[in-house]
Amino acid sequence: MRKRLTLNEYKEGVLAGDRTKLSQAITLAESSLESDQALASDLVQQLLPFTGKSVRIGITGVPGVGKSTFIEAFGKMLVEQGKSVAVLAVDPSSQKSKGSILGDKTRMEKLASDKRAFIRPSPTGSTLGGVSSKTREAMLLCEAAGFDAILIETVGVGQSETAVKSMVDFFLLLMLSGAGDELQGIKKGIMEMADGVVIHKADGDNLAKAKRAKSTYKNALHLFPLGDNKWSAPVITASSLTGEGLNECWQMIHSYQEKMQESGFWEANRSEQRLNWLEENMQYLLGRLFLGNPKVQEMLTQNRSLVASGKLSPLALARDLMQAFFNQKKL
Ligand code: GDP
């Protein structure tokens, strides 16, 4: 069995910025063992006063847009400016594909070898709720370890964007300049979530196209009504190969931070996110308890095919399961 440290050893290790202990603490948080989860929960509680100082940045875009390359180049630029950077990921599909988006060791090698950077592959889990809760814990542990910026990568498939948006301060969307189909391939909902858009791979033959795409996106984004933060998402062009635009991207995030801290939105948003996390956790824990119940499992096994074939109403079975779970009168 894997060796566990004491609560205090984890705590002191994380606070000292010890990478090995930080990794072990994240592994603890990712464990599905009840005793590990209880210990991780105590650890997060004890470290809470030391969290909150990092800027939390979510990064999304369709596969191939260059997220990993961008994170590596952007992260490298930040460490060269003297900042420390942690990279995490939310990838609910990783179980199916048997490899997480950050799991490939050959990716982000340069950044990974820098001692001011910390890269953690995405946790595996059967539900997005479970995975995103673990990522939030990992994020808080990284904050307590003193990282200035936390970059959270997600694949552009819809639900995981919403999960990442609900845990970050700034949500960055990477796009490509396509041949006339700039607005294709990415859901409008995801565009609406973005606090900033980067037209990526703006280099070589692509440069002129990227500039044109920039004004197309600018016009499109202007059509969206402003949200509570009264911020209109800027659009910039950047290349991770030449490094062009990367600093502008950081300036964009920095200026957002300044404005939002001044208006109070920064903290209000984080408060709301904490409450969302509470909600998510309650639903997740309740779901686990319910589905882990032997009587529920037995009834489910017996009756699933009846629901699938249309002979038994899903609503009726769900209510019966609930009733069996609580072992009480019909709801
Ligand atoms: P991801 O799937 O979004 O993580 O994309 P990757 O980072 O794996 O990049 C996909 C491909 O785009 C790779 O072949 C990269 O070399 C290439 N790429 C990434 N960034 C740039 C860039 O700034 N300019 C150009 N020209 N190619 C890039």
Image: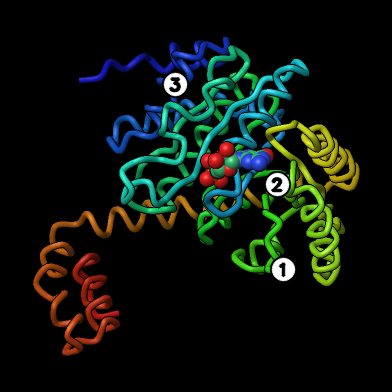
Q: Sequence-wise, which precedes: disc 1 or disc 2?
A: 1
Q: Is residue 174 left or right of residue 38?
A: right
| Horizontal and vertical percent position of residue 44 | 51, 29
Q: Does the residue labelled 2 lie within 8 Å of ligand 1?
A: yes
Q: Position of residue 317 (x, y in %)?
A: 22, 79
Foreground pick, 5 / 172: 172
First reached walking from the N terminus: tag 3 or tag 1: 3
Q: At 26% from the left edge and 81% from the top edge, which residue is drawn? A: 314
Q: From mark 1 to mark 2, how far is it between C-alphas? A: 16 Å
291 left or right of 159 in image: left
Number of dots carrying numbers: 3
Residue 200's mark? 2
Q: Quadrant of the N terminus?
A: top left
Can you see residue 67?
A: no
Tag of residue 23: 3
Q: Check disc 1 and give the amino acid type.
A: Gly
Mark 2 or mark 3, which is nearer the start of the sequence?
3
Classed neighbour count for the residue bearing mark 3: other residues with Cα under 10 Å, few (<14), some (14–19), many (≥20): some
Circles 1 and 2 in contact, beta carbons < 8 Å: no
The three-letter amino acid code for the residue at tag 3 is Ser
Q: Distance between the residues labelled 3 and 1?
A: 45 Å
Mark nearer the viewer, 3 or 1:
1
* Placement of the C terminus among the 4 image quadrants: bottom left
- Name the mark on residue 180: 1
Instruction: Indicate the secondary structure of the residue bearing disc 1.
Output: loop
Toward the bottom, the furthest residue is 311
Q: Nearer the viewer, residue 303 or 220?
A: 220
